[in-house]
Image (spheres, grey):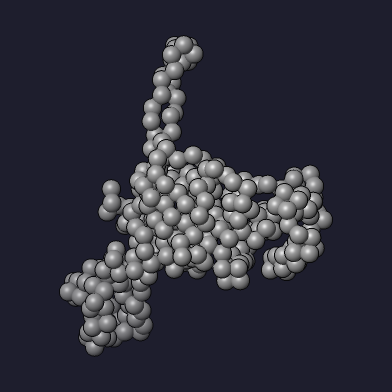
Amino acid sequence: MSAIRVQDLQKTFSVAKKNPGLRGTLKSFVVREYTKVEAVRSVSFSIDEGELVGFIGPNGAGKTTTLKMLSGLLYPTSGKTDVLGFTPFERKHEFLKQISLVMGQKNQLWWDLPAIDTFSLNKEIYEIDAKQFKITLDELIELLDVSDILHTQVRKLSLGQRMKMELIAALLHQPKVLFLDEPTIGLDVVMQQKMRSFVKEYNRKYNATIILTSHYMDDVKELCKRIIIIDHGSVLYDGLLSDIVHTYAPHKSLTIQFEKKVKQEELSKFGIVESYTFPTAVLRVKRASALKTASQILNEFDIADLNIEEPKIEDIIRDVFEQKK
């Protein structure tokens, strides 16, 4: 069953233009010129209940604009959106009680108060039963290990601690759909891993439908089986993360450690020599023949070590962008 359905979604903004200099500034007061900017163009996809999907692309690709339309913060220029059977921009009370949008660079916590006060306020806003509120809050506190900072003023929390509190505030009403926009931005490596573990556990425990945007590919690789790649407002790829490797990376890399020095020309017959500084060489070979090529190299040369490696996901995504331009 689809929790989210998007068809030919488009969002166009009118952006004011101003010529440089004093004359341009004065002219803009009298005659304001506008230009049309397509932030999202003809985006279509469907996400099933309980799916955790990576929504990735460069800055300005249209990711955040799309999430804002799906959560009802922006009205689409054209196209259809359906989230849990609701039209998001109508912002019906029953719809808002079932979704949540968490943006890594925004906050909903009261800066001068402890986070527990925001939680209590959200309890009233979302009309959460007192018993259920306590159960959910206790579960989230345990999952995120924040019992010792509940009564600490928000302004005194570290970025990682504050993001944990932001998540609790966003999840107290147990939303069925969760939009996560860069939830690990600015966090250190340890805190990023803790946040990933939490998102994975929340998805498993509550069968929540989650769309995750992130510039950290480790977030996507660890959490998402399916990814949607968007660039310049259009969808470039929608499918399994594992499939994109086979579709856009028809090669593998052989990293070889030689016992004795060999000539680079001798290696060229096996594949493209990406780098070679004795004793280490890196060859790019066809995916289908990687094992055969590795076996031939092992038979022909004195080898200390040999590894067959997949290309990095980051490099594959970059290739997707380049091929679609």
Tell me the quarter of the picture where residue 195 sits.
Answer: bottom right
Instruction: Please provide percent x and percent y for residue 91.
Output: 57, 44
Above or below 74: residue 54: below
Return the residue found at the far right: 151
**Up/down of 21 relative to 178, above or below:** above
- Give left or right: position of 310 versus 162: left
Name the residue nearer the viewer: 73 or 3.
Answer: 3
Q: Residue furthest bottom?
A: 299
Query: From the viewer's perspective, is residue 231 above or below residue 84?
Result: above
Residue 137 in percent (x, y) is at 74, 63
Name which residue lies at 39% across and 56% down: 45
Left or right of 107? Residue 248 is left
| Residue at 42%, 47% in the rendered image | 80
In percent of the image, x 72 and y 49: which residue is there? 125
Tag count in the figure? 0
The x and y percentages for residue 189 are 58, 63
In depth, the one of 142 and 259 nearer the eye is 142
Residue 206 x %, y %: 60, 68
Asked whether residue 94 appears in the rendered view, the answer is yes
Q: Name which quarter of the figure residue 315 lies in.
A: bottom left
Residue closest to the eye, 305 or 96: 96
Q: Is residue 134 something that shows in the picture? A: no
Name above or below for residue 31 compared with residue 77.
Answer: above
